[in-house]
Amino acid sequence: MAVSSANRPTIDEVRALVVHQWGYDSFRPLQREAIENVLAGRDSVVVLPTGGGKSLCFQAPACAIHGLTVVVSPLISLMKDQVDALHSTGIAASFYNSSLTPAERNTVIEAVRSDALKLLYIAPEGLLTSNMLTLLSSVPLAMFAIDEAHCISSWGHDFRPEYRGLKSLKHHFHGVPIHAYTATATERVRVDIAEQLDLEQPEFLVGSFDRPNLKYRIERKAGGIDQILNVVEQHKGESGIVYCISRKEVERTAAALKALGYTAAPYHAGLSDIDRKRNQEAFLEERVDIVVATVAFGMGIDKSNVRFVVHAGMPKSLEAYQQESGRAGRDGLEADCCLFFGGNDLGTWKRLMASSGEANDAAYESLEAMDRFCKSVQCRHKLLVEHFGQTFESTNCGACDICLDQAEQVDDPLILGQKILSCVMRLEQNYGADYTAQVLTGSQEQRILEKGHDKLSTYGLLEEYPKGVIRDWVEQLIGQGCAIKYGEYNQLQVTDLGWAVLRGEHTPTLLRPVSKQSKKDRKLDPGAWDGVDRTLFERLRELRRKLATEQGVPAYIVFGDATLRDLARRRPSTVNQLLAVHGVGQKKCDDYGPQFLECIADYCVEHDVALDVADDAAAAVAPPPRERKSLSAGAISAFPHFKAGLSIGEVAQQMARAESTIRGYLEQFVRHEQITDPSPWVETETVQRIRSAIDEIGNGRLRPIFEHLGGEVSYDDIRVVASCLANAND
Ligand code: ADP
Ligand code: ZN
């Protein structure tokens, strides 16, 4: 039964409610418009990217309008989280699905019948039973909110036949508005949604697909785990996801991270349901910081404070990339999305697709588009947004590796481009990128000499550069349309645009190779941390984790990261001060206020830190800079043995490796863990001798020390002791 449209609340009333119940002080883009449509009782299709804040678009007006809002959602597993989140905000909501006992179901039915609920979450198959239809026909209904509405369209990427039945809603519930919500962008799907739901002159609202708070960075894989560690270390103690293509890689990476002392859990389809569930919950409740996963992870993961998403290999499409990377920073705070792609990723995906029956032209096309995206040298934000059919105005997004100047242009891209393309021509457009790069470096490889390509005028033309760098340039030229790959062996062919380069009419963009040092200098946006007391923030996180675990809810349901930061910045001492903090509404203030106020007060007394800091007076507490040197996965797997105090010989035996290899690992261990005591690996007397030598001649290069000791002490021992002494002096 439709409720009368008289006495509809105004947008200002809903806004006040959002401030009061949710503790948000403003709407996100399009939320206001979407809510106004709901208040006007007009059908609508709302497209907002993941993290755009779709839920509030129906939850907030649902609280203000008379009658029940029925939320249709495909994922039973998520309903509980959503309802828990609503309860924590003080809103009467329930879900109805097969996970409930018969008694629990009756309670829900009673609540619906007595008009005690504002929102009811239900899956389409449960909604379309005759009992449920009859029940709902007998109570006042405010609206239907169809979540993940693209599931109704066979053009969408996640078609679900049971959604098709929703077409009958308009027939059963005449006059009850229907609002559809999705993150899938294409025009075709949008129109299809409206048609399949029989919407009446719906309003279409399509949000921007840009996620400005996500910082994209894309690099070619350097081998090993270093690139991943770099990201993880910048986010110590924060939540993140590392996506790998294969299960094996998931296991290996998770094990390496654990060995280094990070809390990490694997997630892939090869694990048992119980293990998957346990690992997912540990992540949501923040007992584990990092989930290492295949794409099996993430559907419907509603965790707002994921601070980084790493792709340890290329995703299978830009849609998948947008969705997976989009799981970062849903709270609107800055987050890092780093993608490391390798030459084999494309082939790996093709194999996986062939074995799972997913292989088809469309899938291959998506793969190729993703591959081009990785190798492109244009703003990542711009390319992504344009892929989804929108335009991107800014010429410098300030939030991707390209725009952040980390990728500087080479001095003379025209000449460089011409050299490369003319080599492609000299090779009669018959060879691939790798071979071309080899010829340009002047490689002495057999097959080049055999074919006489060392006689070409372009042979060795770029000998001052490493092959990998030239390869990147070739890919950049391809990404900009100056050349294409064709044929079975990905041979290169110069395009019309490439010819324009050769004639000097078009200058390509070619990037200077990024040095390791400049990568290290990259800073995360410190602005959001201005004035935040990091130690207090950690304390508050601890408290949040405790409360979340006690109540069996995801941590973000207690408070989001933005709220914790604001708490650690303002350090409120009273309930009124607490209510001024971002994300703290009346209900949460009642539920958690006392604990958090006490924790803050204790901390401030202990550390002699001021309470009730005004906005502008907050002093910046910068995070300490971190340094790290290169580490290998092999070394990491040896760390636990070293920690257990095993000797080099014992570790070598355990790991079935040569002692010399283990010594290399030990060196990395000592450096990485800042070990100061060499005694487990070097005899006390030897340590003493090396020590006095260093006291006399200083802790510089090893050779003088070796000579000072008359060649009687091995380099291996000197190296360990010298490193430990250096660590002790740091
Ligand atoms: P979507 O369903 O579109 O992916 P959600 O509805 O889950 O996104 O919202 C994403 C996050 O944004 C949630 O953590 C939510 O609490 C937060 N959020 C939504 N609207 C606002 C707002 N107006 N101000 C601050 N945070 C918001
Ligand atoms: Zn950019």
Image: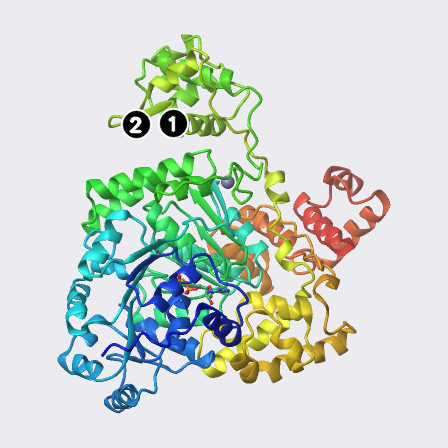
Residue 237: x and y in percent read 57, 64
Q: In the rendered image of this protein, does residue 413 appear above or below residue 210?
A: above
Q: Residue at x 45, y 73 (%)?
A: 554
Judging depth in this view, the residue of 530 and 707 nearest the camera is 530
Look at the image and tell me whether residue 585 can be seen: yes
Which amino acid, mark 1? Ile
Indicate the quadrant where residue 168 lies. bottom left
Please tell me whether mark 2 sits on a helix, a strand or a loop: loop
Which amino acid, mark 2? Asn
Quadrant where the image shows the N terminus: bottom left
Label 1, on which residue?
478
Q: Residue at x 58, y 74 (%)?
A: 542
> Is 531 placed left or right of 630 in the picture?
right
Residue 447: x and y in percent read 35, 18
Residue 444: x and y in percent read 44, 18
Q: In the rendered image of this protein, does residue 423 appear above or below residue 26?
A: above
Image mark for residue 195: none
> Is 236 placed left or right of 71 in the picture?
right
Image mark for residue 490: 2
Judging depth in this view, the residue of 652 and 114 nearest the camera is 114
Mark-to-mark CA distance, 2 and 1: 12 Å
> Is 472 placed left or right of 229 in the picture?
left
Please tell me whether mark 1 sits on a helix, a strand or a loop: helix
Judging depth in this view, the residue of 696 and 553 nearest the camera is 553
